[in-house]
Image (cartoon, rainbow, N blue to C red):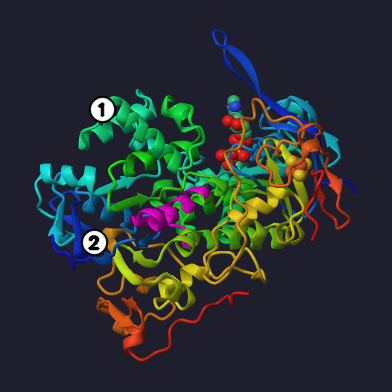
Amino acid sequence: MSALLETRTLSKHYRIGSALRGYRTLRAVDGISLQVERGEVLGLVGESGCGKSTLGRCMLRLTEITAGEILFDGRDISRASDKRLRPLRPRMQMVFQDSYASLNPRRRVGDLIAEPLRIHTHADGARRGEAEIAERLGELSHLVGLPQSALQRYPHEFSGGQRQRINIARALALSPDLVVADEPVSALDVSIQAQIVNLFMDLQESLGLTYVFVAHDLSVVRQIATRVAVMYLGAVVEIGPADTVLHSPAHPYTAALISAVPEPSVGVTTRRITLSGDVPSPVSPPSGCRFHTRCPSAQALCSMTAPALQDMGDGREAACHFPLLT
Amino acid sequence: MDADAPLLAVDNLTITLPAGRGRTVDIVENVSFRLDGAEIMGLVGESGSGKSMSALAIMGLIDAPGARIAGSIRFRGRELIGLDRRALRALRGAEIAMIFQDPMTALTPVHTVGWQIDEQLRAHQPLSRAGARARTVELLGEMGVPDPRRAADRYPHQLSGGLRQRAMIAMALSCNPSLLIADEPTTALDVTVQAQILDLLRRLRQDFGSSILLITHDMGVVAETCDRTTVLYSGNVAEHGPTDALFRQPAHPYTAALLDSIPPLRGTRPRRLPSIPGAPPAPSARPPGCPFQPRCAYGHVACETRPSLLPIGAQQVACVLPAEGRALPPRAVLSA
Ligand SMILES: Nc1ncnc2c1ncn2[C@@H]1O[C@H](COP(=O)(O)OP(=O)(O)OP(=O)(O)O)[C@@H](O)[C@H]1O
Ligand code: SF4
Ligand SMILES: [Mg+2]
């Protein structure tokens, strides 16, 4: 069986600048090939601006792509029109970080969750009746842990965590196969974050969902993801089983990223790999390996030839000429 | 000035704001802590717990109409509450400095960062333009800004987030303050850049003997950076103590539950994360007893009276359990 979602040398470039000062190309996503298998949770990690959100939006064709291909359930949707995408839309949904911005403040929670049910018909074209919608609303609120009474209230009456439950219910209304969640717990306080991470995990298990879970917090991703893709400047530099990648990283960037996470415990002595400088601009990514300007292992070859993703023999791939050996 | 007094002593700080229709609400209640020389203290808590308000009160920067500040804030023994604006401003420039999450709170977009630091220096010291610039370049260099001479000629928006943060820290340190208040200084930064800035803060303490009040919501940042830690919950101190002791054996059920709910980066991955039910109360709906009681796994009748801070070992905790002779809350996840 084919992967649920596959990208083949997918690129998304933005033209930035102005007529006056000249246009330049920003390579937000630059030639990414990966597969998302049914029932897995693929975590996308990397620092601000590395292209996580752009990749997530491309996967669901919420934006036009510049080059490459996207296959959903074996079907090429790279350039599919809105009309051709429409029957597939219920099967792919997105949850965003900002739980408030994605909810119309003037509508009741019940209406917000029911909206996709009203917009989309059944696969055979039949509309959903009000009785059916009411029943589904009951199921959904139970599923995400919202009291029935919540359906009559407005978004502002809820805390951030509860609003994220509303967003999740909305995303699940049409029983999707794939959910792309973009930093869905990043804005939440830790004590609430744990509730929502658990909810994501429970739902994935009970409904057999497939997630692409975008987060900059490595420990959140480790908790929920089965596989992890590490991004740097629009490219995937390492991808593989979560435990393999996060416990014994092969790419020097992954290693540095993990070592920079401050851990909430005392007595763990970890070797900090301090990277100098900041991430270069995606308008002019460095030649050769994109990471060579900050890489502690870089050698002459690295600035000349770009390393391709290679199988490391343990189910993970890394794009580095001198991968870290364990 | 009292030579024996702690650098900063905050006692029973209460900040009250008007809440409409003649009512008021206590944003911060009876918060006490102190900070010694060459010490980094973490003030940690979730959003709305009163961290930033406490910092602004110390800086004398709360000017909301109708705000009332009670208690005592002494800097080297000198009371700051009620001090007149001029004296406060003098203190802020020279003795106490503050840095923020967003460097643009402190920097203006219309001048180069070098110009802004020069001005700050010249406002407090008799320096020529050239002399000030030399010191500015030196400061930027000390903050780890590469090519500081060129960086000084840049406007804030021409610098990366990490460099802007360093420029703001350079400006804050320009007059050698003995106290630096850092409000979520790394929250907007990526982890690799955050690591650089936290290194810098530790170096300031080590090399210059600066004292830092580090405000953050990130328990990891606290564990790595702070000598002592004060945990706030809903405008009240839940516990404080040496960072080492507090993380090894949190004495307050809130601290323990909070630490448990953070997914671990290493070791066994829990099947489910231990989570705290519900959400923190709004200040106007804070229970009269222990503010954490409605969410606490150990809540009982005795918790309906507000517990005061009691010492337990090197820590102090606002919880009835230790006084009742009960064991401290066990940690759910055993650290590997
Ligand atoms: N509409 C747009 N026009 C121009 N540039 C864009 C646009 N959207 C994104 N970018 C740029 O593309 C790059 C990747 O952005 P993206 O939002 O995908 O990153 P991200 O990894 O999600 O970052 P964060 O962690 O900050 O959310 C960035 O340099 C960003 O500035
Ligand atoms: S290819 Fe070279 S520069 Fe790139 S990550 Fe590997 S060692 Fe570092
Ligand atoms: Mg993003």
Circle 1 — which element?
Answer: loop
> Where does the magenta region start and end?
B196-219
In front: label 1 or label 2: 1
The single residue placed furthest to the top in the displayed view is A20
Residue B250, picture quadrant: bottom left
Which one is nearer the viewer's eye here, B247 or A138?
A: B247
- For the point 22% across and 53% down, the residue is B58
Based on the picture, tell me whether residue B197 belongs to the magenta stretch. Answer: yes
Along the viewing direction, whichever of A100 and B320 lies nearer the viewer: B320
- Residues B154 and B303: in front is B154
Q: Pointer 1: residues within 10 angstroms few (<14), some, or many (20+)?
A: few
Q: Is residue B45 above or below residue A33?
A: below
Res. B7 mark: 2
Q: Position of residue B45 (x, y in %)?
A: 39, 61
x then y, percent, for residue A9: 81, 33
Q: Residue at x 82, y 49 (%)?
A: A317
Say which element carries label 2.
loop
Residue B129 falls within the magenta-colored stretch: no
Count of all numbered marks drawn on residues in the image: 2
Q: Position of residue B7 (x, y in %)?
A: 23, 61
Q: Hey, what amino acid is under mark 1?
A: Ser
Q: Is residue A80 visible?
A: no
Check disc 2: other Cα within 10 Å, few if <14, some if 14-19, many if 20+: many
What residue did someone put label 1 on? B128
Please, which chain is the residue tagged with disc 2 on? B
Spatial distance from mark 1 to mark 2, Cα to Cα? 32 Å
Q: Circle 1 marks a residue in which chain? A: B
Could you say which is closer to the camera, residue A300 or residue A209?
Answer: A300
> Which mark is first along the chain, 2 or 1?
2
Dots 1 and 2 on the same chain: yes
